[in-house]
Structure formats: C-alpha cells, structure tokens
Image (cartoon, grey):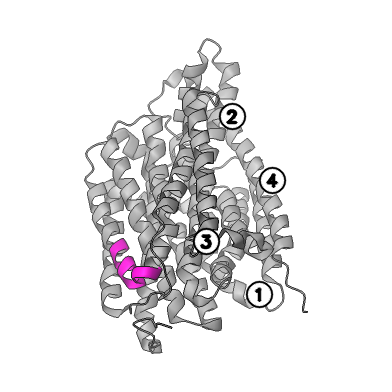
Amino acid sequence: MHQSPAVAMPTASGRYPVVLAICLAALVLPLSFTGGAVATPAIGVALRADAMAMAWITNAFMLSFGSLLMAAGALADRYGRKRLFLAGVAGFTLVSLLLAGAPSILWFDGLRAAQGVAAAAALAGGSAALAQEFEGPARTRVFSLLGTTFGLGLAFGPLLAGILLDEWGWRAIFLGTAMLAGSAALVAWKWLRESRDPQAGRLDVPGVLSFSSTLIAFTSAIILGPRQGWASLAATSLFLLAAFGLLLFVRGQLRSQRPMLDVRLFRLPRFLGVQLLPIGTCVCYIVFIVLLPLRLIGVEGLGATQAGLILLALTLPLLVVPLLTAWLTRWLSAGCLCALGFLLAAAGLLALSHLPVGGEWPVLLCLIVIGVGTGLPWGLMDGLAIGVVPRERAGMVAGIFNTVRVASEGVALAIAFALLSALIERQLTHSLVGWSAPARLALAQQVALGDLKNLPLATSGVLQRAYLHSFDTLLQGASLVTALIGLVTLVMLRPARPS
C-alpha cells in the first residue's frame, strides 16, 4: 500500500491559516455569483447586450462551474489538493481582473465561463484538502464553518455589489473579488500541505466530455426553448444531445473500475437524500438571490444599495442558523432538521407571493423565514456529504456533491427565467393584442431580466403589472417544489435502525 506524500497531521495553529485560505475562497465564489446578478442590468447597458447575451452572464459561469466539479475532484485526488486549489484561486484572480476590463459582452460571457472553470478547481481542491486536515466532530464543525462562509458571501454579496456598483460602477465588483481570491492564494501557498489519493486513477476524459455536454446542451435548450419554440429543431436537437450524453456518461461510469462518479451510490436512499439538499436550497433560495435584485432594481426602480439592504433580511440568517445546526442535532435528527427547514422556506415563499415587495415589515419577515428555513439544511449538507464514503475518496465525493449543488443552480436558474418569461408573455397576450407572438416573447425575456429602463414608457405600466403577477406565480411554484423536497428528505434521511 502506497502512502500519501504528506500524512502527518498539522498542529492546531497550522490548521488555522488553512481554514482561512479555503474560507476566503468560499467567500469569493458566492460574491462573484451574487455580484454578477446585481450588476446584470448595468453590464447589459454598458456592453449593449440583448436579453439572450445577458442571460449568459450568470449561466456561462454556472455551467462551466457545475460541469467540471467532478473532474476537478478527481484531479485533486490524483495530482494534489493543494496544487489544484492554488491553480483555481490564481486563475480566478486573473480572470476577475480581465472581466473588469472586458470590452464587449461576447468577451464578458466567455470570461465568465473561464471564471467558472477556475471556481471548480478552487472549490473541489479546497473541500478535499479541508477534509484531510480534520477528523470526526472537528470535521463536522469546520465544514459547518465552510457553509457559514458561503452564507456570508451570499448574505453581503448583494449589498457589497450594490455599494460598489453605485459608487464606482460594475467593473469594481470584479476587481474586489480578484483581491480576495489573490489573498486566498497567498495564504494557501504558504500554509496548505499537499495531499493526494494514492489509489486515484487517471482523469476520465470521456466521462468529463459526456457529462459537460449533457449539462450544457440541456441548459442551452431551456434557454433557447422559449424564444425558438420547444419543438423547434434547435431545442429538440439539444434535448436529444443531452439525453445521449447522459446515457454515455452513466454507461461509462458503470463500466469504470474507478469511476469519476460512482453511480451505484445513488441506490442508497441516504446518499440520494443528501444530493436532494442542494437542489432544495437552490429552488427556495439561490434562484431568488438572482431574481430579487433584478426585480428590485430593474422593475421597482430601487437603487442597488437599497436593494442589497432589503436582501439582508433573506441572507443574514445564513450567518447564524448553520452554526446552530450541529447543536440542534442533539434533539432532532439531521433529516428532521432539513425537512423542517424546507417547510419553513416553502411557507415563506408562499406568503411572499401575496405581498408587494418593497421593504415593508411583512415582506422582510417573509424573507427572514425563507433564510432561516434555508439555513437548517445549509449548515448540515456539507458534512453529511463528506461522511458518505471513506476519507480517502473525499475528492470524488466533494466533486459529486458540489456538482449537484452548482449544476442544479445553473439548471434551476435557466428554468426559472424560462418560466418567468413564459408567464409574462402569457400576461402580455391580453394587453398587447396587436403584437406578434415572437415580439411579445422577446419583450417578455427582456422584462424577466429586469430591463425595463430601455423600454417604451407607454407600455411600462403594463409590463410592470405583468412581471409582478408572473413573479408571484413563480414564488408559489417554488413553494410547492420546496415543500415536496422537504417531505422526501424526511423519508430518505431518517436515522438507520440499529441491527
């Protein structure tokens, strides 16, 4: 049996800088995600982008991020967690600087895809490296801290992005993330020890290509479907390509002796239940972290800073609640806590759909309930995911879990925008009678992205009413899906009976 080159556990004082470096990276990723969402209307105006190009500001990042996380986990195990983490944060720093100077929307969207590649390397390498530094309850606590750090980025991301946007423009957002990522790289270079899995095999290139093509084709079909028609040649071809890619991926993983994703794990109800957790938090939380700033800024006319302050009611609970979850498990099982959280979030979404968003206390209370509900599974899911298989396979498991997390975010965002556009277009059918269906749909997609400032004043009231009604319907649908995921989670994550 070969041993990893570095097996000695570091002292407690040596672990603190490691935790700092990885948490800094974990802070940068949601800041980049939420910052791009807040800045989307301003970027669209500055770079003269249409609705389709603006949609890719977020989707390009999420697609490359999600599709390469499993590959990054496998590379971390084979070539070293520190090496991959450093490559990721250094690349993220460079691409963020280039984004700040992007001359066109085409360049910007391409760089956002490259930023997602770097983010995948940083997250997979950092999570796997952190799993090697701690064991037992200490590992649970440190991964709870990691989840809280993600929450910190999500909590203050919209506000910080709003301040930077109002004071210095959208390019300052990406300069700020570059500074944080560069700091993480410097700390990790000095303090993070190298580790790898001595049994790790070669990178499964066909698996990476088939999985990436599946995710990209499926998401692209969802984005193109509303504009070109779900039965159009482009949408149908993309859906077929996604199905074929998924078939090739599953077949290849089942035949592999050392799969990048062990498909057999999905036979285990508890493992499958853990994978549902990031999907649920995406539906009830992540989607609206992106949509609410577009609504507040683009549709309701609030300033970016003011919108960020309102969103604190939604995001601040993720700073506190995840830290309490380990304590709460003394009385309630992880499955019960996760289910309770999803049901709370579902109730908050449903109540919010009956209120006008704008900052009044009932709205803020609903946002707090959604944030508290999301915080319960958020604080548990990283630790639950890492504990599924032996520690030596941490890179693979981190890759699977984070791939589900990020891929579901990208797909859910694409679905949410498609549904919102379709709902708005249906509302406009009764208001803009003289308009053709393609013209109404193009207008609806522009409105769904919060781009009302460049539209004719004569129709602004009609468009705003159509948007608000459609947004409420979307909230109600998200509430139903979140509640269902909560109930399924309760069953799948129930404690095992003693034999």
Look at discs 3 and 2 and give the one toward the viewer: 3
Nearer the N terminus, badge 3 or badge 2? Answer: 3
Could you say which is closer to the camera, residue 459 or residue 90?
90
Q: Are marks 1 and 4 in contact (CB under 8 Å)?
A: no
> Which residue position holds label 3?
401
Nearer the N terminus, badge 1 or badge 4? Answer: 1
> Which residue position holds label 2?
423
Q: Alpha carbon of mark 3 to alpha carbon of mark 4: how far?
A: 24 Å
Q: Is residue 185 above or below residue 70?
A: below
> Which residue position holds label 1?
328
Q: Which residues are magenta?
A: 77-88
> Which residue position holds label 4?
480
Q: Amino acid at mark 4?
A: Leu
The residue at the point 41 percent across, 20 percent down is 456
Q: Alpha carbon of mark 1 to alpha carbon of mark 2: how far?
A: 40 Å
Q: Alpha carbon of mark 2 to alpha carbon of mark 4: how far?
A: 17 Å
Look at discs 3 and 4 and give the one toward the viewer: 3
Q: Secondary structure at mark 1?
A: helix
Q: Is residue 145 visible?
A: no
Q: In the rendered view, does 52 fall on the left or right side of 108?
A: right
Q: Amino acid at mark 3?
A: Phe
Q: Alpha carbon of mark 3 to alpha carbon of mark 1: how far?
A: 23 Å
Q: Secondary structure at mark 4?
A: helix
Residue 86 part of the magenta-drawn span: yes
